[in-house]
Amino acid sequence: MNYLISGGETADGTQQDFLIADGKIVKVGANLAKADAIQIDATGCKILPGLVDLHTHLREPGREDSETVLTGSTAAVVGGYTAISAMANTNPVADTAGVVEQIFRLGQEAGLCDVFPIGAVTQGLNGENLAEIGAMANSAARVRVFSDDGKCVFDPLVMRRALEYVKSFGGVIAQHAQEPRLTLDAQMNEGLISSQLGLKGWPAIAEEAIIARDILLAEHVGSRLHICHLTTAGGVELVRWAKSRGVNVTAEVTPHHLILTDDQVVGYDAVFKVNPPLRTQTDVDALRAGLADGTIDIVATDHAPHPAEDKDCEWQAAAFGMLGLETALSIVVKTMVESNLMSWSQLVERMSTKPAEIAGYSEQGQSLASGSVANLIIVDPSATRTVDRNKMSSKSRNTPYHGMILPAVVTHTFYKGKLVLSPEGVHQE
């Protein structure tokens, strides 16, 4: 199928038409015409590279009641993502070549976007013995990112060995920075509000201590370190310091940590219970500044679906996590672009180009040029939508933005030249 997208503009504001054929962008220019192409009028819209998420929980295998690779892929393309990265905390854990290959093939069968498995660092996420890192790297899934996300690789010797191992093939360790002894039974950010609510606090130092340690380990080994879901002002300063020293470290921030604070916890609504926790406005401001100046490299969703029974319960018993794929772009536009902290071009860098570069996804995050793989989206920046948890494409409903009016609507998503999202809905072949 051939498509001609006309009337839209790229991230930098240049008006361009795009002709798509055989899975690629075959021509870029002004006033293009092709009689046999399906015409898409993108007047008033942005044409951007498909978004890339390095932090997605798809739950399959093991918790298909929360999400599957197919439903997660559906949510992804609705949000403008053409590549997502499936975290390893499945059941069984993605710590062997067999499990990562299963997830990879489920993504291929869904056919809506690239699904790249992230391999576990340690066996069973237990933090003690290294997983089959080499076998996963050499598998059909070609894993290059490894993480025990949901748990911290807390043993410094194990972390050092992991960093040394992935260095041999250019891999990266993505660390969930959480000192377990400082967060035992913790429920929310440690501070005034946790004291008022009587909930066990989760101190910023528990995150920052691991970040500092791992920066030093990465520098010592000369390997690549990625910090998952950065949440504190102190963490931003540590990453900034590491980069000034030339340490090969990258960091991500989630959309919800750019907009929500621990004030939301006052009502004990467990939809706001997330790991790491929502922090203070001071932290939010530091995260926005860090993302704007490039200290924080990327935005990653930490999309964490849960069934209703795991959230509609008392706070202490509720699961950690919230949905992210379908609303991430809108949250970044609202917090960073509309506030003039970032341009659309910088948004593309943080949500497409750089995450693809970190993970080595060669067909993702490309410039929209003739010959590039046609992974792209059309976004109407002037459109708004009211978030309705009952209309989410995810299998779960735990969005923290229910009822919120958000800007920037993805109208079309192209994956390898296939139209997988249009105003009529998601299209699966």
Image (cartoon, rainbow, N blue to C red):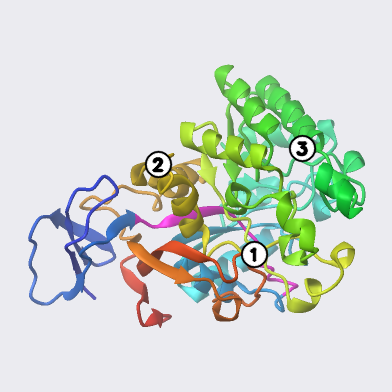
Q: Which of the marked residues, 2 or 3, is nearer the chain's N terminus?
A: 3
Q: Secondary structure at mark 1?
A: loop
Left/right placement of residue 97 relative to residue 186 reads left
Where residue 309 sits in the image (x, y, percent)?
80, 78
Q: Residues within 10 Å of mark 2 (few under 14, many from 20)?
A: few
- Compare residues 179 and 104 and report the one nearer the observer: 179
Q: Earlier in the sequence, mark 1 or mark 3?
A: 3
Do the residues under discs 1 and 3 have CB atoms within 8 angstroms? no
Amino acid at the residue labelled 3: Glu
Disc 2/disc 3 C-alpha distance (Å): 29 Å
Residue 316 location in percent, x, y?
Answer: 89, 62
Q: Which image quarter is the C terminus in?
A: bottom left
List the residue tagged with mark 1.
400
Foreground mark, 2 or 3, reads: 2
Front one among 203 and 264: 264
Alpha carbon separation for disc pair 1 and 2? 24 Å
The residue shown at (79%, 49%) is: 151
Kindly give the residue lying farthest to the front in the view shown. Answer: 196
Q: Please give the residue where the numbered disc 3 appears in the rendered image.
A: 207
State the separation of the CA atoms marked 1 and 3.
23 Å
Residue drawn at (29%, 49%) of the image: 11
Secondary structure state at the residue bearing disc 3: helix
Whole-percent x and y of residue 194? 85, 48
Q: Where is mark 2, residue-wise? A: 340
- Magenta residues, as a range? 49-63
- Determine crowd level at label 1: few under 14, some 14-19, many 20+ residues with C-alpha closer than 10 A: many
Picture coordinates of residue 337, whole percent (x, y): 41, 47
Under mark 2, the amino acid is: Asn
Residue 326 vertical position relative to residue 123 in the rendered view, above or below = below
Residue that lies at the very extreme toward the top in this rendered image: 245
Q: Is residue 80 visible?
A: no
